[in-house]
Amino acid sequence: MPTIEERLDKLEQIFLLGGIGAPGSTEADDRLNRLNHLMGTLLSNERIGALLIGTLQIGTVEIEDDAITAPKIVAGAITVGDLAAGTLTVAATLGTGGSLESAASGARIQIDEDEIAGYDSGNNKQFYIRASDGKGVFGGGDATIDDSGLHFSDTSYGDGIFWEGLTKKSKLEGLTHATDALLRITAEGTVDAVAIWDSESGFVEFNKGVRLWALTSDPSVSAGSMWYRSDQGEIRVEIGVTTYSLDMTAV
């Protein structure tokens, strides 16, 4: 591609041969000086001023790939309200006060310098990833997920793992009672737990009794196991290496 100097030389030849005046004449020199000044102003540092380009006059077909580089773009010089479909590749840092939002309010995803957060339609933050340590946080801030697993704090009995049914739901939650750590299974609509496992004392407690599977033959079990032999109408328990049946009297 010819340089600006080469283009000016060409223009000089055109003007001279086109009847501007003979080389060395005052008229020709004056015209060329004015032309040189005008071109130098319009094409300063090989840039074309905005006044020379009409609105929407340069399309993507006229701009080659990688033709515009970052050093050619002055900071804060590009303002857009919309980016056309395509691939946007950015390696940048989100600065103080900057944010990206899928919506202005209500249910949305929001990214700022502190976190990536998800909000419901009531503008309540449901889940977020903290920039300070990279951990995911939920349960109103009482539960986290990180490289070591899923953690629930003991600051609220309302947190836990929920299983949603068609009309009811159950919850598994951990809590402390006195010095014992408890794992509790609670059914929706009940005050007391359906089952509690005390990891310190080593017992399991059920508030509605224990149901044993009905078997028609003795299983291969370890000491301390209990099962119901439906064909014999008796409960059996393994103690040591011996199987015992429990006497049952109707009540």
Image: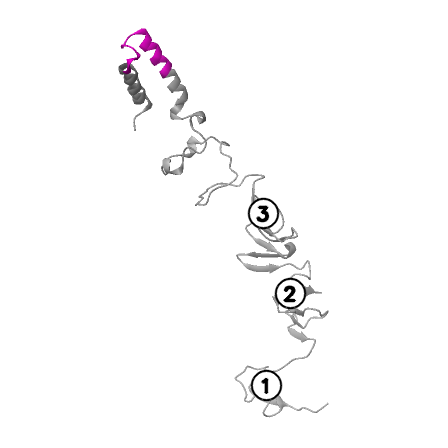
Camera-near label (2 vs 3) is: 3
Name the amino acid type tagged 2.
Glu
The x, y position of residue 189, in whole percent, is 71, 69
Range shown magenta: 18-35
Q: Quadrant of residue 3?
A: top left
Assign the magenta stretch its main secondary structure. Answer: helix
**Residue 204 image position (x, y, % from top left):** 65, 74
Among numbered discs 2 and 3, the one appearing first in the sequence = 3
Q: Is residue 92 left or right of residue 38?
A: right
x and y, in percent, of residue 195 in the image: 66, 73
- Quarter of the picture holding the N terminus: top left
Q: Earlier in the sequence, mark 1 or mark 3?
A: 3
Q: Residue 214: which disc?
A: 1
Quote the CA–CA distance across marks 1 and 3: 56 Å
Q: Which residue is mark 2?
A: 173
Q: CA distance from mark 1 to mark 2?
A: 30 Å
Residue type at mark 1 is Ala
Asked if residue 164 is among those painted magenta in the image, a careful observer would answer no
Tell which of 15 and 128 is nearer to you: 15
The secondary element bearing badge 1 is classed as strand
Is 69 located above or below residue 164 in the figure? above
